[in-house]
Amino acid sequence: MSYVTVVYSTVAACALLLALIHGLIWVMDRKAHASLAFAWLALAIVGGVVMELGTMRADSAQAWGEWVRWTQIPVFMRITATVVFIRLYLGTGRAWLMWTIIALRSFIVIANFVFDPNFHFTAIESIEQRSFLGEQVTVLGHGIARDWQWLATFANLLLLTYVADATLQLLRAGSAESRRKALVVGGATLVSALMSMLYSQLMILAGLQVPALLSPPQLIMFSAMAFELSRGTLRASRLARELEGSQSRLDVVTAAAGLGLWTWDARAGSLWANSRARAMFGLESSGDDFLVVDTVRRLIHPDDLGRIREIWRHAAAAGTEEEVQFRILLPGAVTRWIIAHGRSEADAAGNLTRVQGVLRDVTDQWRARLENEELRRELAHAGRVSVLGTLSSSLAHELSQPLGAIMLNAEAAELLLNKPQTDLEELRNIIADVQRDGRRAAEVIDGLRKLLKRRELEFTPVAIDSLLRDVMALLKSDAISRSVLLECAIDPELPSIRGDKVHLSQVLINLVINGMDAVSGMPAAQRRVILDARMNVDQAVELSVTDLGHGIPEEVRGRIFEPFFTTKSQGMGMGLAVSQTIVQAHGGKIWADSPVSGGAIFRVSLPVGAAA
């Protein structure tokens, strides 16, 4: 049995198998460039084994020289694959030095086929037979080395320098794991390269009569690289198992939280969604969990599509996470409200490439919100009716004044018409007075109708001076009947706000009536309520109602906005609660202060030109 053939064939078979495995790894993952370099190195090992077997079986000096000539091809492949693998796997090594080595080895390969018998020798004069692994093999008897053989030696020294430099860089700056990789891969490569260089130089320059054994030293480096890549493969397998467990735990968490997972790949045009996300859209689950984008797009409400696209583009440009709420339309006129939370990714040109995140069905919350809004409107309407009941006598007085004036003017006009000569100018003045009083009565009735009407919030521009004048006019008679001085201070430069004038009027009416109630038992000089409007430090319009009453006790200050809490013997405890709800619906806030001088101040802050 030829042990040489058995050993070399086994090495070649193992190297070929590893080349196939890592070549397939690169095919499946085009980013696994280190696996591609290793597959190239494995093929070089196979080629080197074949060439070395050829030199051992050569039957003439010319045949031996020809085999040595072709040996330069796997040597070039091996050295090229080594420097590229070091660069890719260790992440270090100087690029200019790597390309210098590749260029120099390329020149040697070309020169090897230009000159006879090969690059290393000008003449091969004889061959010898020596015993190796129990059989006779061919070795170089006598040959004359070329003068430029030093180029090959120099290329090998550059290789040693490159590997040593890359290893030292990683040892100095890398982590513990990186330093281990540097010692294993870099150390094994240095030992292999040094042994190969010394062996080849002894054979070529010193005339050592030994077989051309360049592959055995390379097996040290080759085994170290295979070991490291295998560790990576095993680690990937372990990570895959851990990922599977994490996916299972994630499914449990998302199921408990009612969340659906989704990913949209804009380049591939694919939309992945798990079973819960599919159920939200009324779609059946399938094995691949991929959806047709057009199917999902047709389910989304048309009014929401443009807004969704704009939000995700903005998120991709800003690199932030965003949240968007939209509606989906299911068969049977069923509408669902969905919140999508996710992150967008964009390429270098700013084009949207990927969006991924979670979905949450908030239909029940939305319905509860609508029910709460309906309840709020009912309470607000009840509050307005209650206020009008409180102001009934004042409102009757407000109406009796213009109606009484109209009657008096009508009687005066009748007397003028009975005279022989009618004073037309006086009659015109009387008619003008009647029209003015009629408009005043109509305004009071229109204000009553608006307050009594059950309505939703309607956001329109509201002038602050107009809002406060209407409230002052409505409460003027009640203030007079209570002997309360009602004052108003308005900054003329105040901007308009966006809001519902009727609901905002209700807030101020509640606060002013509370203020008048607070000063009702005070001395005449303290029966004052001041309505004020100005810009605050937050650049918002601040409305305040100040009274000089007993103030708000410290123990109840935190509860005054709670529903059904009241300090009045005849109160319902809904006025301030409804007022807070209305203010929050306008995107503002309401709070109360107790000045050191006494009394109470209720403040309402409303954003300028903004609606909730």
Image: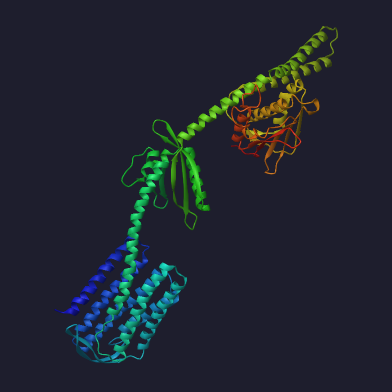
User: What residue is rendered at 35% in x and 88% in y?
Assistant: 149
- Residue at the extreme left of the image, as rendered: 1
Colouring convention used in this rendered image of the protein: rainbow
User: What residue is rendered at 37% in x and 66% in y?
Assistant: 33
Residue 512 as seen in the image, left or right of residue 290: right
Quadrant location, the N terminus = bottom left
Q: Is residue 355 above or below residue 554?
A: below
Q: Nearer the viewer, residue 140 or 429?
A: 140
Residue 585: in sight, yes or no? yes
Q: How many marks?
A: 0
Q: Nearer the viewer, residue 221 or 103?
A: 221
Answer with the quarter of the image where residue 442 lies: top right
Residue 384 as seen in the image, left or right of residue 129: right
Residue 83 as seen in the image, left or right of residue 14: right
Answer with the quarter of the image where residue 276 lies: top left
Q: Position of residue 508 (x, y in %)?
A: 68, 30
Quadrant location, the C terminus = top right
- Residue at the extreme front of the image, as rendered: 555
Q: Position of residue 22 (x, y in %)?
A: 30, 66
Answer with the quarter of the image where residue 231 lies: bottom left
Q: Nearer the viewer, residue 179 or 597?
A: 597
Q: Nearer the viewer, residue 40 or 472?
A: 472
Q: Is residue 312 above or below residue 380?
A: below
Q: Position of residue 150 (x, y in %)?
A: 37, 88
Residue 99: in sight, yes or no? no
Q: Position of residue 609 (x, y in %)?
A: 64, 39
User: What residue is rendered at 41% in x and 39% in y?
Assistant: 298
Q: Is residue 67 above or below residue 230?
A: below
